[in-house]
Amino acid sequence: MSDSQDKTPEKFGTVLGYAPGDVPAFSSDYSSVDARLLPTRSSFRSYLDGVYLGFKWQCVEFARRWLYVNCGYIFDDVAMAYDIFELRSVRTVGDRKELPLQAFANGSPRRPEYGCMIIWAEGGEFEHTGHVAIAIEVTDDYVRIAEQNVGHQLWPAGCNWSRQIAARVTEDGEYWLECSFGDAEILGWVIQTEDKAYGEELDSVPVELLNLQARELPAREYQTRSWLNIANEDESAYVSMMGGHKLTSVDADARKFYVMSESAHEELIQATKQLHSMFMQATDQVLRHDHLLRRFAFPDSMLPKIKKSWDNRLNQLITGRFDFSLSDKGIKVYEYNCDSAACYMEVGKVQGRWADHYECEAGDDPGEELFHHLVDTWKDSDVDGLLHIMQDDDPEETYHALFFKDVLEAAGKRCKIVLGLDGMHRDEAGDIVDEDGELVRWVWKTWAWETALDQLRLETDDDSTTPAGTNSGLQAGQLRLVDVLLNDKVMVYEPLWTLIPSNKAILPVLWSMYPGHPLLLNTDFELTESLASGPYAQKPVVGRCGANVKLFSEPDQLLEGTAGKFEDRDKIYQEYFPLPRVGDYFVQVSTFVAGRSWAGTGVRVDSSRIVTGRSDCMALRVVPDSELYD
C-alpha cells in the first residue's frame, strides 16, 4: 500500500488493522463522526489505564499508545508531531523513570529499527502538524510502518502494518527513506537508545545568551512630543490612565528598554508551546480526579459546570499569558494566566509606538504581531453574533476593553462594551438582553472568573444547594454577575474551565506529572522537607496581581512579601527561583498565547522581587545573538 493510493476512507473509529502487540489503529475520518457516540470534545480524548494518550485518532495518539503497550513508556505531550524529533527522553509509565531518546536524520548511517518512530516535517501533506509512524519492519529496500490519520483505509490483508516506504542504502552506508507524497519530507527517526553516535545534537543555547540587558536611548528634543494617537479610543484611554504619552510610569525611565537575544526568544517560544500542552494535560488530570479538584477551592455548585465547560469548550481558549524568570540560571515558568490577563495593549501596540517615537533601531519588536494573532484567533472562534465586552469602571480595564474591541472588529465581529451590568435585564421570555433589547449570547470579560465566584460565595448561604445563576433572594429581574456569566445560554470567553490552569493549585499537579522538568519549579501543597531546606515561596492558590505572595530565605525567615485580600486562601509552596535584576529592576518576561500558539512577548519590571498589578511594563527588543553585547 503506497502513499499515493486513493481509496474511500473508512468511517471514523473503524479498526483499520492491528500492529504488533495487538494494538489497533483506527480511522480518523472526522467528516464521518457520529455526534451521538462522541457528543463532546472531551469524548475525543484517548486514555488507556487512565493514561492520556492523545486525541482520537491522530498519529501522535497511536505512537504513544503503541509505545505504552509494547515498551511501557510514553513521550511527553507535544503540540505537533514534528516536535517529537526534538525530544530527548521518554518516561516509563509506572515509576516515571526517564529513558534517553536519540534522533537520526534521514540519510543517517544509523538506520531505523523495529519500534522506532519515523517523523515527517511540517508541510505539504502534513501541513502545520508533521506526522509520526512506528517502524514495524526494516530492510535495505523498504520500511513498513504502522500509523493513524493517513488515508483512513484498511491495512493490507493479513498485515500488521499500514504501508511501505521505499528505502535506499548508499555505498557509504547512509540510509535514506523516500516519501512518495511529493510535497512532504521525512525528517528521520527517533530511537530509544543511549547511543548518540550519528544522532542529531540539539543546539544548546550558551547560558549567557539567556541574560537580558538594559539599554537607554539618547535624549532628543522632539521626544517630548505626543506619540500616541488620542483620536483612537484605546490610545486616548491609555494616555488618560497613564497621565501622558508613556510606557512606564517613571519619567526617568522613558528612554530605557530591554533587549533579549534571538536564541533566548526562540527558547521562550518553544517553552510557551510546550507549557501550554503540559498545562492542558494537568487540567485534564485534575478534572478526572475529584481529590485534586477539591484542592482548587471552588464552590461545590461550580464543579459540574467546570467539567461541562471542559467537555464542550476544550479548544475555545482565545488567549493567555505565561510569566517567566529568564536568566543564565535557566528558564522557569511561574504561572499561566489564561483566565484573565493584562498588558496586551502595552505589548501589542504601545511598545511598538514607543520604538517608532524614540527611533529605537535595535532588533525587532516581539509584540508586533500580537494584534494580528488575536484577530486570527477570534476569526476562528464560534462567535457568530453580537459579542458583549463586559468590564468594570476601571481605567486599566477601559483601555484593555477598547483594545480588544479593535481586535474583535478587525476579526469581523460586532461588539458592544458594557460597564458592569449596566442596562442588562431579563426580557419577557427570561433571556438576558442589553439596554437596547439585544440578546446577550456571547461575552468577553476583562475580569477573572474568580470575581464571579467570590460573588457566588457571598450571595449564597449554601453553594452546594443553591444553583449558580439563580436569583435566589433578589427581586424579579435583578441580575447578578453570576446570572450572566453562568447562564447556560451565554457563552463566555475565556471558557469557565480556564479557572483550573489559572489557579496556582495546578503547579503541584504539574510537578507531580513532570517531576524535574527543566521549565518547572518544585511545588507542593505542603511545605516539604526539600522545599524548606532552601529559599521558597508561599502563594495563595487563588490570587491576583502578585497579592499575598511571601518569599522565605528559610522557614519563618521572611525575605519579602505582599499584602492583599487572599490571605485566608489555601496555599502552595514553591521552590524560590528569583527574577533577575537587570539594571534598576527585577524583570519578569511574559509570553502571550493566541489559540494554542505563541503570539507576543513583553516584560514587566519592579524594584521589588515580586511583580504586582502596579508593576510597570517597559519596551522589549529582540536582537541577533551577535549584537547582544555590542
Image (cartoon, rainbow, N blue to C red):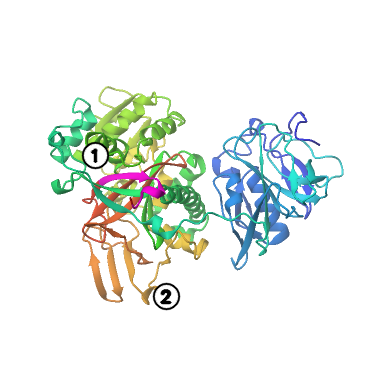
Labelled pair 1, 2 in contact (Cβ < 8 Å): no
Q: Quadrant of residue 80?
A: top right
Question: Which residue is under mark 2?
Answer: 530
Where residue 520 sits, quadrant-wise, is bottom left
Q: Amino acid at mark 1?
A: Glu
Alpha carbons under labels 1 and 2: distance apart: 41 Å
Q: Which residue is mark 1?
A: 397
Residue 533: % across, % down: 37, 77
Identify the residue at horizontal 34%, vertical 25% (top origin). 409
In this rendering, does residue 321 appear at all?
A: yes
| Front residue of 421 and 100 | 100
Q: Residues within 10 Å of mark 1 (few under 14, many from 20)?
A: many
Using the rendered image of the protein, determine whether residue 429 is visible from the camera's viewpoint.
no
Q: Position of residue 600 (x, y in %)?
A: 38, 41
Considering only vertical position in the picture, is 37 above or below 283? above
Q: For label 2, count other residues whose C-alpha is less than 10 Å away and answer few (under 14), some (14-19) or many (20+).
A: few
Q: Position of residue 199 (x, y in %)?
A: 65, 56
Tag in front: 1 or 2: 2
Q: Tell me which residue sits at (22%, 36%) in the image.
A: 398
The magenta region covers: 618-629
Pick out the residue farthest to the right.
158
Residue type pointed to by label 2: Ser
Q: Is residue 229 above or below residue 583?
A: above
Tell me which numbered mark, 1 or 2, is placed earlier along the sequence.
1
Q: Secondary structure at mark 2?
A: helix
Residue closest to the eye, 244 or 213? 213
The spot of residue 85 in percent (x, y) is 61, 50
